[in-house]
Image: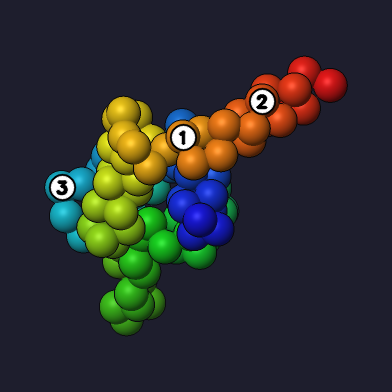
């Protein structure tokens, strides 16, 4: 669960989503990402650090440049998780322990 939290945090920024969109075409050099988004090098470095730390993106050094690509396994895991929480199922946490939902709802508005 902690990994998914980090992934979702990493995806909660417009620029990082744009970077992922660019990387969906394949591996790219950081300089190409910078030029494509018209962002400064420090800004790109900041976003790439977050994406790499979360595991969403893989960074690999080529000479003096960094190349980046999407870790498709992480994206597949996230997609499966989102599919899981949006479908009706017998093993829902509320079905296993109905009092949990009451407790969660009660504490949400305090």
The residue at 33%/74% (across/down) is 60
In the rendered image, residue 96, in percent from the top left (x then y), is placed at 49, 41
| Residue 81: mark in rendering | none
Which corner quadrant holds the C terminus?
top right
- Graded by Cα atoms within 10 Å as few (under 14), some (14 to 19) or many (20 or more), the crowding at tag 3 reads few
Of callouts 3 and 1, the N-terminal one: 3
Residue that label 3 marks: 25
Q: Label 2, label 3: how many angstroms apart (C-alpha)? A: 45 Å
Of callouts 2 and 1, the N-terminal one: 1
- Graded by Cα atoms within 10 Å as few (under 14), some (14 to 19) or many (20 or more), the crowding at tag 2 reads few
The residue at 31%/35% (across/down) is 89
The residue at 47%/52% (across/down) is 4
Residue that label 2 marks: 102
Q: Label 3, label 1: how many angstroms apart (C-alpha)? A: 41 Å
Vertical placement of residue 72 versus 24, above or below: below
In the rendered image, residue 32, in percent from the top left (x then y), is placed at 29, 52
The residue at 20%/46% (across/down) is 24
Of callouts 2 and 3, the N-terminal one: 3
Check contact, mark 3 vs mark 1: CB within 8 A: no
Q: Nearer the viewer, mark 2 or mark 3?
A: 2
Residue 32 visible in the displayed image:
no
Q: Nearer the viewer, residue 45 or 82?
A: 82
Residue that label 1 marks: 95
């Amino acid at each position: 669960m902690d990994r998914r939290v980090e992934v979702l945090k990493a995806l909660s920024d417009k620029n990082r989503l744009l970077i992922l969109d660019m990387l969906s075409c394949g591996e790219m050099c950081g300089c190409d990402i910078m030029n494509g988004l018209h962002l400064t090098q420090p800004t790109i470095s900041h976003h790439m650090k977050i994406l790499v730390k979360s595991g969403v993106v893989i960074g690999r050094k080529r000479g003096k440049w960094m190349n980046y690509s999407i870790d498709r396994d992480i994206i597949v895991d996230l997609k499966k998780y989102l599919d899981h929480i949006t479908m009706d199922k017998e093993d829902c946490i509320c079905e296993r322990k109905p009092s949990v939902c009451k407790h969660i709802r009660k504490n949400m508005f305090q």
